[in-house]
Image: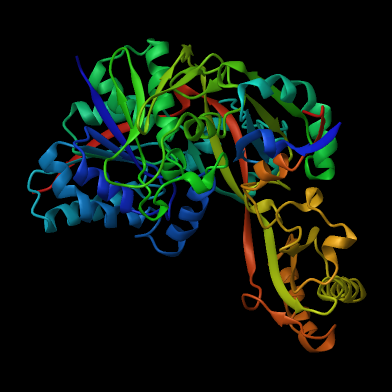
Amino acid sequence: MTHVHIGGGQGFWGDSDDAAVHMVHREDLDYLACDYLAELTLSIMQRQRMKNPAAGYARDFIGLMAQIAAEAKRKGTRVLSDAGGMNITGCVDALAATAGRLGLHGYCIGYVLGDDVLAALPGMQADGIDLANLDDGRDFGDIADKVVNANVYYGHEPIVTCLEQGADVVVTGRATDSALFLAPLVHSFGWAPDDWDNLARGIMAGHLLECGGQGAGGNFDYDWRAVPDMANLGFPIAELTESSFHITKARDCGGLISVQSVKEQFLYEVHDPAAYITPDVTVDISQATLTQAGDNRVEVGGIKGKPRPDRLKLNIGYHAGYRVVTYLSFAWPDAYEKAQAAAEILLQKLAKKGLKYRDCLISYVGLNALHLGVADMSPERLRDQNEVILRLALLTDEKAEAEKIIPEIAPLQLNGPPGASFFGGRAKAQEVIGLWPTLIPRGAVQLTPHLQKVD
Amino acid sequence: MRQIRLHDIAHGRSGDKGDTSNVCVYARRPEDYELIRRLVTVERVKAHFGDMVRGDIVRYEVPSLGGFNFVMHHALGGGATHSLRLDTLGKSMGSAFMRMVLEVEDD
């Protein structure tokens, strides 16, 4: 019986390499998939690429591959990643150079192009695709002149083609996180494109692995103190056969695979559990079951699939203004009252000078900056604080407006309530990027698999 | 009657998609699933979050896992970098949810 082991090597761009390096060396994985892209990541990468044409992908992946490519090749562990971001060929070239330095002659790099449809937007509109906002129906005309990037979420097929052609590693842009995991399972088991139940199992394997440590005892609300050795946290591994599906982790590392730890990841960022929509399949986990099947081993069952949607999700990043965030610290006595007064003084100054902003949020770090209206701000809680950090966040339409506000903040250190001090340095005008989700027909996108061999 | 926090009988995690936050809520003990189903209604969650959540809230039941998925729209102050919040991705929406005070029968 075919038995496939696949590891989740990264949870986000900036995650630790440690667990991926450990599992590749300690276990005999068939595949390792590494997700670097969150919703906003591509917009950030597009901005990086505009400043430097060689940038725009997750360079961290090259650093990881330098540590694991030779061992992975020796063991036959094939690697998949969306690290290509907004510069897939740049990522492939860097990877080829690294493989060359490691002496991996004949190393085969597959990659998929076509998710970046920025240049195709006018043509889509000419073809009658309205690009209306999926969440609120707004007209695309509202942001048409402010677009930063436009990338379509796609599924497993072109990644499978790369694997069929012998790729040791496959680099993508905006494939869905879960497609990176489904593709090798489809390749190994030969699942048909309409084998909805199996495709759904593969998607859930990806869903439980794509956030790395968060699927193995990281960010664990149930009982975080009970997670062993978090300094050596392992990341999850999925083991699938035609009839079984287990989540586990590598030997000799920390972390926890329990029913509760898997549960917390199970519905993470899912909306309707009976219709979790992906480009590959509509997943139904409303009857799913989780069973402890051994030490750090959970069996997943009851997953069903329904036909995939006709349209693909396109996420358009657009320029949406500027943000100024600043922190001022105050100490006992009356720390909270002083912080409150400082915020009041600043807003009075801005009003008097007619400085414009679209929105403003005042909060107090340590008191209510996270839980906002739900935080306990009773007089007993606020009395006699050791220290309070005022956080002021403002949104402006124009950069010039933000830059006029910034110089009004620093004087509060000497011209306001006593003891104020800058926390985290002088504020900067940061670009705000909004996200515009929309749906487009599958036929509007041309995804092409490619292969490059290292000499 | 006595007061407890939802976190005493439940655990979960929050995630984000744009300006939408989802919080999954699981009963710590199977016998508390019905209690959560009865007390943690959409209306109760709306009242708990007040202004923090400006859109619709939907509750999905997943009895086979002993839990619920709450999907809260316009819940992250605009979402992504639009949000002026410290926690733009709503990583702490789960714990904010778990602060909810519930009135339960004395043991």
Question: How many numbered callouts?
Answer: 0
In the displayed structure image, the side of residue A279 where residue A424 appears, left or right: right
Q: Nearer the viewer, residue A318 or A208?
A: A208
In the displayed structure image, the side of residue A373 where residue A52 appears, left or right: left
In the displayed structure image, the side of residue A427 where residue A313 appears, left or right: left
- Counting from the top left corner in percent of width and height, residue A198 is at 37, 14
Residue for point 69% across, 40% down: A141
Q: Nearer the viewer, residue A56 or B49?
A: B49
Where A36 falls versus A55 (above or below)? above
Which quadrant of the rendered structure holds the N terminus of chain A?
Answer: top left
- The quadrant where residue B11 appears: top right
- Counting from the top left corner in percent of width and height, residue A118 is at 49, 42
- The quadrant where residue A11 appears: top left
Residue for point 58% across, 21% down: A273
Q: Nearer the viewer, residue B40 or A163?
A: B40
Residue for point 26% across, 50% down: A21
- Counting from the top left corner in percent of width and height, residue B21 is at 66, 38
- The quadrant where residue A103 appears: bottom left
Q: Which of A231 and A2 is in front in this view?
A: A231
Examine the rendering and report whether any part of residue A107 can be seen: yes
Examine the rendering and report whether any part of residue A178 can be seen: no
Colour mapping: rainbow
- Counting from the top left corner in percent of width and height, residue A239 is at 30, 26
Where A149 falls versus A248 (above or below)? below
Farthest residue, direction front: B107
In the displayed structure image, the side of residue A111 where residue A411 appears, left or right: right
Farthest residue, direction bottom: A414
Residue for point 42% across, 56% down: A14
